[in-house]
Image (cartoon, coloured by chain):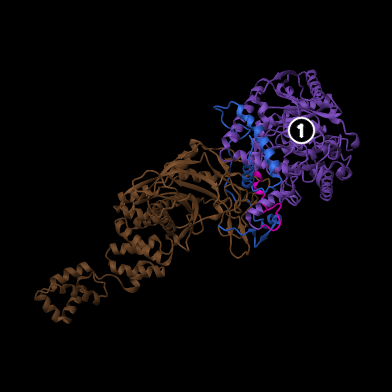
Amino acid sequence: MSAWETVIGLEIHAQLATRSKIFSGAPTAYGAAPNSQACLVDLGYPGVLPVLNAEVVRMAVRFGLAIGARIARHSVFARKNYFYPDLPKGYQISQYELPIVAAGAIEIVLEDGTVKRIGVTRAHLEEDAGKSLHEGLGAFTGIDLNRAGTPLIEIVSEPEMRSAKEAVAYMKKVHTLVRYLEICDGNMQEGSFRCDANVSVRPVGTEKFGTRAEIKNINSFRYVEKAIQYEAARQIELIESGGKVVQETRLWDPDKGETRSMRSKEEANDYRYFPDPDLLPLEIDAAYIEAVREALPELPDAKAARFVAAYGLSAYDALVLTASRELADYYEAVVRAVPEQPKLAANWVMGELSAALNKDGLEIGAGRLSAERLAGLLVRIADDTISGKIAKEVFEAMWASGESADAIIEAKGLKQITDTGAIEQAIEAVMAKNPAQLAEFRAGKDKLFGFFVGQVMKATQGKANPAQLNELLKKKLPG
Amino acid sequence: MYRQTLTQLAADLRARRVSSVELVRAFLARIEASQRDLNAFVTVTAEQALAQAEAADRALAAGRGGALEGVPFGHKDLFCTAGVRTTCGSRMLKQFISPYDATVVSRLKAAGAVMLGKLNMDEFAMGSSNETSYFGPVRNPWNRALVPGGSSGGSAAAVAARLLPAATATDTGGSIRQPAAFCGVTGIKPTYGRVSRYGMIAFASSLDQAGVIAASAEDAARVLREMAGFDPRDSTSVDAPVPDYLAELDQPLAGLKIGVLKEFFDTGLDAAYERCVREALAVFERLGASVREVSLPNIPLSVPVYYVVAPAECSSNLARYDGVRFGHRCAEAHDLEDLYKRSRSEGFGAEVKRRIMTGTYVLSAGYYDAYYLKAQRVRRLIAADFARAFGEVDLLMGPTTPTPAFELGAKVADPITMYLNDIYTIGANLAGLPAMSVPCGFAAGLPAGLQIIGPHFAEARLLNAAHRYQRETDWHLRIPEAYA
Amino acid sequence: MALTREQVENIAHLARLELEPAEIPRFQQNLSSIVEFIGELERAETAGIAPMAHPLPGLTQRLRPDVVSEPDERELYQKNAPQVAAGLYLVPKVIE
């Protein structure tokens, strides 16, 4: 039995976050009543014509520039002809030979920390199809064309990923990028961001690609990983048992955790692409490209590098904190309030805050705990008003109540005791209450030092300044 | 009053010498009387027309109204008309009620034209004889045994028989000019992009252009002025000002350089027809124009180019007729493929199927380069031939068709013979040029057409030349005896 | 060039047309003569000539501002629909 290598290429479909559709003035909002957002152009009515949405072009150029790609000065819309009920015109307007974006690259960080560059062959504009509903209509399938004509950018990678994990890292990176660029809301549940995976296997050390299967419409990072793992294993098993992989379209079934052949797309397609005569060539000039370039935000890679340099964060922490623009912005807002403590801020944002958000299923932008409020807590840690341990208690109260850190510290009397006299008093009381332990300590049982720390902390409800307490105990216990 | 031109009728309406209601009633009566013989209309909208005529009369009485206020008018049945059946001559759209107006329709409505009905045509504008219409053939008013030409046969026959002063038409490979020639009326196909295609049911998108069929160049100019202009809903519509075609009509022709298309006289041109065209050229010379021979070496390939490009585009344009959202749907489909195949096969006629299949073939894997791309390359050669010619002359002239109107059924058996009917007209579509057909006499008792082709956006020059010619001749005023 | 019966059937299937068995020979003959006719193009010398997809030279695609302009007209638009239920267009059940 030989060792196998998996070869993966992804085609990511990202819906562009425009108000209106790519070729019509119908709205693109998700979740409207069936066919209430399908206008004559979206329905492919006789006589209607497409006109290209300016915002779609700007967004595609933004994406192209962000991945260092070539922006085509001249691109062409073509018709991809096939019959399917969710495709009203009998053709999809897409870009074929001359896409708007060509030859870019995206960097991903592998598990061992190395950086890998994944080539992006092309990214082109096209219109989304409608949706078929199969449930509850008896012998019929229902067609909702609200989604028909929603602008998509299809981002096609080179077959350069070698594991499901790499594919997920790549998809996550693209997801981060499109949201940074504000060209896609990234909502995978609503299908705004989804992908097809081309998967093949070959014996390790060989050059030639194996026959690939295309897995359609995967709409979560977890499923991408599972579907690729399943598919690679299926292909390996098939080959090892003497079978042959056939080139086909397969569907990921999340309920069964498997991929299966799609009957409806089985026949060899002949899409008969040709330039759409209803649309003229799209010409983009240098000035336009420069204007879009100037309006680009700081991108995740640059931001992460800056976090390392400016805040002294580890590469890993910087990567985590720049995973979304909202998270990065939040972190920096916290740092602005506690400029001396960037690492403390990073620990709290990635630690307590992320855990709390996760637990409640909230997004960073949900506004449950503003950066200013969290910073208020960190300030109190930094100025020794409270200890780190007390701070966790305060954080929980803040998460639950909406109060400021100071208000909670005040109300619960959590302020740290830094008055030497008060701490000494507490120490003396503990020493008086525990003569046996004191005697043992003085006889050389050093381990009991911890016992006294604990007792004093207990007596002060944890509010004694730990450093001061240590100092004073060292002085007092030996007698 | 039906004998009067649209120009005269518009003036009479404005001067209140006649009311729109009177005119509409008179033309409706003529339509009704002719319908069994000519079959020029698919739908007559008498009630709406009378209501619209009353409104036009009120506007005219108040001194308001557009340039065509109250003028009876008709639309080829591939212009979408809100609330009115729009069939495209097909069983597929037999019951299709458009929810919207084509831009051409709304512009003419705004100008005050009163629609009397929708005109018969070849199915989806695919045909040169009007015999492919699901609603039966239109007959030629000059001789009812003959075809009126196509695909705008209903528009041409209706104007020739004076059932309407003018009507819209469309031209993909000659569908305005050929029936205009066969019926002895004036037709103009403007430059591609001059008139909006929005709401005009597509046959071949890179070739289709809306125009007008009327009794004279002056009438055509009057209507075109209202139809033409930029439309933001059509990406191929050209954003350029529309000249006042009427203002240019009377310009003298002295010094005009006319090129006579050598290749159009080479093969298959009917001798009597040729005499009519030569005589017309002599009239232009008398008007001060110079005439010289011009060659377009690649023009003989225009028909094969057309029969690749037009079917390719049509095969895709007609894919939307699938029985799901509108149009014919077969009974009791047992699965999706059955629904598609039977709805489409029942809904489309044989010629439409032939074109869809030809187009599917030339775009399919393995044939795309050899046919589709090759045809688009030759198309550029043909366009370049025209561009070169217009470097030397102002207008090109020749016959519109190789023969006058032929008998019904004469060419239905052989598609190629039928296709070759458009041999002189297709070039202008491939190059997007404006072109006209003007009545220029009778060949064995049947109308002959002089074709005039100009450079892009030279509609004013075309109409000017045609109008000056029509001032010297009366061919355009002849009315078939049965309708005189 | 003559098209085989199989080719004609394949083209008809791609175009989702159902031909009666009796019609096929006629379409086969028609299409063969059309293909032969357009085969004339082979003679043209087109080396170095770019395909011409649009009749007007130099025109480029115009852009539309990203504005919602189309209201919900479902009821009107579905008047032409052969079969709808709950606002959905119905087709025979599709198995994916």
SS class, disc 1: helix
Q: For the residue marked with disc 1, what is the amino acid?
A: Gln
A310 sits left or right of A241 in the view: left
Kindly give the residue lying farthest to the front in the view shown: A242
Which chain corresponds to the colour purple? B
Residue B160, position in %: x, y? 84, 35
Q: Colour of chain C?
A: blue
The residue under the point 64% across, 23% down is B388
Q: Is the residue marked by circle 1 packed among few (<14), some (14-19), or many (20+) residues within 10 Å?
A: many
A451 above or below A139?
below
Q: How far from the left and from the top, in percent, is residue B198?
A: 68, 43
Q: Which residue is disc 1 drawn over?
A: B178
Could you tell me which chain the residue with mark 1 belongs to? B
Residue range in magenta is B316-333
- Quadrant, the C terminus of chain A: bottom left
The residue at the far left in this view is A443
In the rendered image, residue B427, in percent from the top left (x then y), is placed at 68, 29
Residue A135 seen by the camera: yes
Q: Which chain is brown?
A: A
